[in-house]
Image: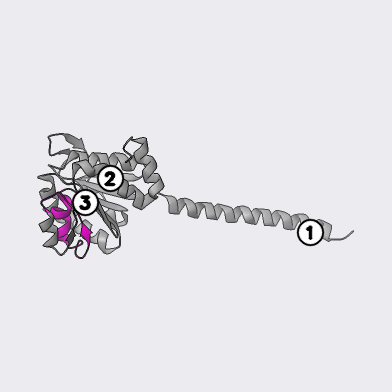
Amino acid sequence: MSNISFYEPSVGLYVIEFMRYILLIIGLIFSFNMKSQTSYIFLAPGFEEIEALATVDAMRRAGMNVVKVAVADTKNVCGATGQTVVADSLISEINPDDAEWIIIPGGQPGADNLHASAAVNEIIKKQFARGGKVASICAGPAVVIAPTGILKGKKSTCYPGLGEMIESQGGKYVRQAVVVDGNVITSEGPGTTLKFAKAIISESLGAQKADETLTSMLADE
């Protein structure tokens, strides 16, 4: 009897086990790569509630992990219209070094309070320097983002009437609902919030996922 008849089954089993191992490794790599990074949206007293909460809502509906961060001594942050929101974390509790998005809402005095935070300014600069994504809306781009220097040479938008603050820092103000320039997204204000959120989702998960998310909210254009 030939030895081959005894050898072939063992080779076949070896090949099958080897392929299982390879598929397991591929699956683990795929799972790791698809794992959602954490994004952070910063809330200081006087933040614009619609811009912050509608953005968080849409992102979470899309399956994105976003953390509401209080730039205050308490997680209870009062917004521009007097609504108190409970943040997920204090700014002192987070490590945004591997953040997907750093998001800055507008509202007053919220934008001024974010601008006055040395920690927020440092986080924005570090995020941009390492090639991370930054998004801001309403007064945020002009009052908070532009002074950090990251809008220099970039097109961006903000609440109408504040464009000169962007241009004074070397940016190019554009009057439109949402502007995407590289890894920075900016938007005009409360009424453009869902378009702003859609742009964020699209950049992270693709246009189809963004469309599906907004359609499910009956907010498709």
Residue furthest out toward the right: 1
Task: Residue 154: say if magenta.
Answer: yes
What stretch of residues is rendered in magenta?
135-162
Q: Which residue is mark 2?
A: 195
The picture places residue 30, in percent across and down from the top left corner, at: 49, 53
117 is higher (above) or lower (below) than 75: below
Residue at x-position 64% and y-position 56%: 18
212 is higher (above) or lower (below) than 103: above
Say whether marks 3 and 1 touch (CB < 8 Å).
Answer: no
Of tags 3 and 1, which is closer to the observer? 3
The Cα–Cα distance between marks 3 and 1, rounded to whole angstroms, is 71 Å
Task: Residue 97: say if magenta.
Answer: no
Q: Which residue is mark 1?
A: 7
The picture places residue 115, in percent across and down from the top left corner, at: 13, 53
Q: Which residue is mark 3?
A: 176
How would you rate the neighbour count of disc 2 (Cα within 10 Å): few for under 14, some for 14-19, many for 20 or more? many
Task: Give the image quarter of residue 2.
Answer: bottom right
Q: Secondary structure at mark 3?
A: loop
The numbered mark, 1 or 2, whose residue comes first in the sequence reads: 1
Q: Secondary structure at mark 2?
A: helix
Query: How many marks are shown on the rendered structure?
Result: 3
The numbered mark, 3 or 2, whose residue comes first in the sequence reads: 3
Q: Is residue 166 visible?
A: yes
Q: Quadrant of the N terminus?
A: bottom right
Three-letter code for the amino acid on which mark 2 is drawn? Lys
202 relative position to 55: left or right: right
The picture places residue 134, in percent across and down from the top left corner, at: 26, 55
How would you rate the neighbour count of disc 1 (Cα within 10 Å): few for under 14, some for 14-19, many for 20 or more? few
Three-letter code for the amino acid on which mark 3 is drawn? Gln
Residue at x-position 29% and y-position 52%: 101
The numbered mark, 3 or 1, whose residue comes first in the sequence reads: 1
Say whether marks 3 and 2 touch (CB < 8 Å).
Answer: no
